[in-house]
Amino acid sequence: MEGKGLRLVFGVHDRGREFYESAKRLGLEGVVGKRLSSRYAPGRRTPDWKKIKILNRQDCVVLGWTPGQRGRSDSFGALLLGAYANGDLRWIGQVGTGFTDRMLADLRERLRAIETDRPPIGDPELARVKGAHWVRPELVCEVEFLQITSAFKLRAPSFKGLRPDKVAEDAVLEPAAAPEPSSGKRRSGATAKAPQTKETSRRRAKPQATKSAPSPATREARSRRG
């Protein structure tokens, strides 16, 4: 069953939890559930279909923050986050949702106490974040997110709280936060080549014309004409 924007790959009955865990191990974004007794209602939403997102959690180091706007102009807009990968602290994105008013007030005071005048890591892209304020990499927080992109940035993160029980070095990029698999599309201007062996070299070589020695019958016919 296929339609515009939908391809049904696989379905199971009565084993939803197992199906969910299998999808999580495969690094998928989520699963779709449907009430068995329901009918398909084209063109409208119904409570009989559910999109169930697969969420991950990650401890992050706060690297700085961006200015708040509108209702949060007296606070911050988003926290700039980092995590350790292969022993190096790297920028993995920012989180701007999941905060309560109490969290915003508490974090504002904590951030001001550790503010510094330069980025805590040497990432040129991070240094170009407009209006960013920097802090010493001491605060650790926990975020919930969908995936980490191929550029090592959090996708759809949400703030869950501070982790005062942890230090910055504990914020190691989790194995579950592996980047999304590539789409398999070639980059512009790039070409893919298969390994070349002696056999493929012989097959690809341009055929060359050769002259064979004349047969005895051909030689005799030629001598008669001559």
Image (cartoon, helix red, strand yellow):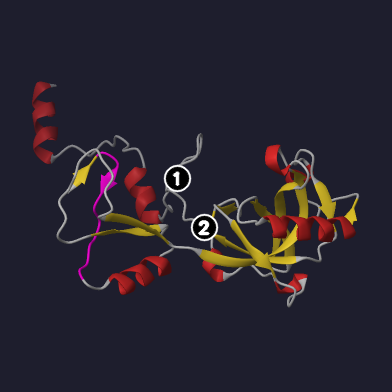
Q: Is residue 46 left or right of residue 196?
A: left
What is the chief secondary structure element of the magenta stretch? Answer: loop
Q: Residue at label 1?
A: 192
In terms of sequence position, does the residue under pointer 2 or pointer 1 come before the other? 2
Q: Position of residue 67 (x, y in %)?
A: 76, 43
Q: Which residues are magenta?
A: 4-13
Residue at the location (74% across, 62% down)?
Answer: 89
Q: Residue at label 2?
A: 147
- Name above or below for residue 18 compared with residue 217: below
Residue 38 placement: quadrant: bottom left
Residue 164 placement: quadrant: bottom right
Residue 72 placement: quadrant: top right
Q: Position of residue 134 (x, y in %)?
A: 83, 51
Q: CA distance from mark 2 to mark 1?
A: 28 Å
- Name above or below for residue 185 compared with residue 141: above
**Residue 219 versus residue 102: which sits nearer the camera?**
102
Q: Is residue 85 visible?
A: no
Return the residue found at the far right.
117
